[in-house]
Amino acid sequence: MKRNAFVFILGALLVFSFGLVNAQNSLDITGPPTGSWDGGTKVTTGTDITWTMHITFDENLLGHSVSWEIYIADSPTGLPLNPGPGFTAVTDNYLYDFVANGYAQFFPQYKSVDGIGADTVGSGGYSVNGIPAGTSVDWLELTTSLDNSLDGQDKYLCIDSAWYPPSNPYVLSLATSGETPPDWGGPYCYLIENPENMPAEFDVCPAVEQVFDHTVTATYDFDATDPDPAISPGPLTFSYVSGIGDIDPVTGVWSYAPSIADVGTVHD
């Protein structure tokens, strides 16, 4: 599904003829974004969600005109909600230096980057001799994040290629084939839903009665593990509800200095 995009004028250096889509020419995401916690169907709120774009082409690349739209929808096939609920303005981070690798001009473009309705970002550029055929590199990263209020609202975060119909499509300009739409598998949509935050679990906990000498400080090291650290990152904090002694909130080490009055006493 193609949506809003940019108009890029690549200049006379581009070959304005349409070639067949070649399976070796692609510009697509590398896989689920960061912030997806179930392998690629759901994303969580309150953390960065980043897609990595990968480009592959089998002819010299003379130029390109591409853009993507990130938006929130009611379903995986739905249109962007406008104004949509809150996501942070999309940022881009180019991992590949086009000019250093043969481009004469390269220019990022931003139609909308305010986190309302849909954010559309992309780029264009051209080259005299072209970037060599066979190049296959991670192109850029696109990042946003979601407001916590979106959790459990049956909304989807989506990303799709975009263009201004009927011209200026999502294309690479190749030395022989001319303007060729690269393979793109989207739209990609992810249900906005946070996983249940499970409580920490003790790794070491006494299963039998502990006996201590009243002349020595009694200690016990309670170790624990967070079963889902990605949901609530950060160190565990130890505390106790009732009982004797003290527990170190960082290490989980419990200690108690008994006295002669404790001899023969059973503490729960």
Image: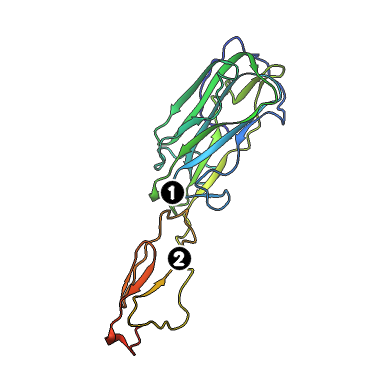
Q: Residue at x 33, y 88 (%)?
A: 265
Element on which disc 2 rests? strand
Q: Identify residue type, mark 2.
A: Ala
Relative to 114, residue 74 above or below = below
Relative to 267, residue 38 above or below = above
Q: Nearer the viewer, residue 187 or 44?
A: 44
Residue placed under numbered mark 2 in the picture = 224
The reply to whether dot 1 and dot 2 touch (C-beta < 8 Å) is: no
Image-based side of 247 in relation to 6, left or right: left
What is the quadrant of the C terminus in the image? bottom left
Q: Residue at x 53, y 46 (%)?
A: 190
Q: Position of residue 57 (x, y in %)?
A: 68, 26
Residue placed under numbered mark 1 in the picture = 45
Q: Quadrant of residue 178?
A: top right
Relative to 215, residue 3 above or below = above
Which residue appears farthest toward the top when viewing the image? 12
Q: Residue at x 47, y 48 (%)?
A: 155
Q: Residue at x 63, y 23 (%)?
A: 172
Give the CA separation, mark 1 to mark 2.
Answer: 26 Å
Q: Identify residue type, mark 1.
A: Thr
Q: Quadrant of residue 26?
A: top right
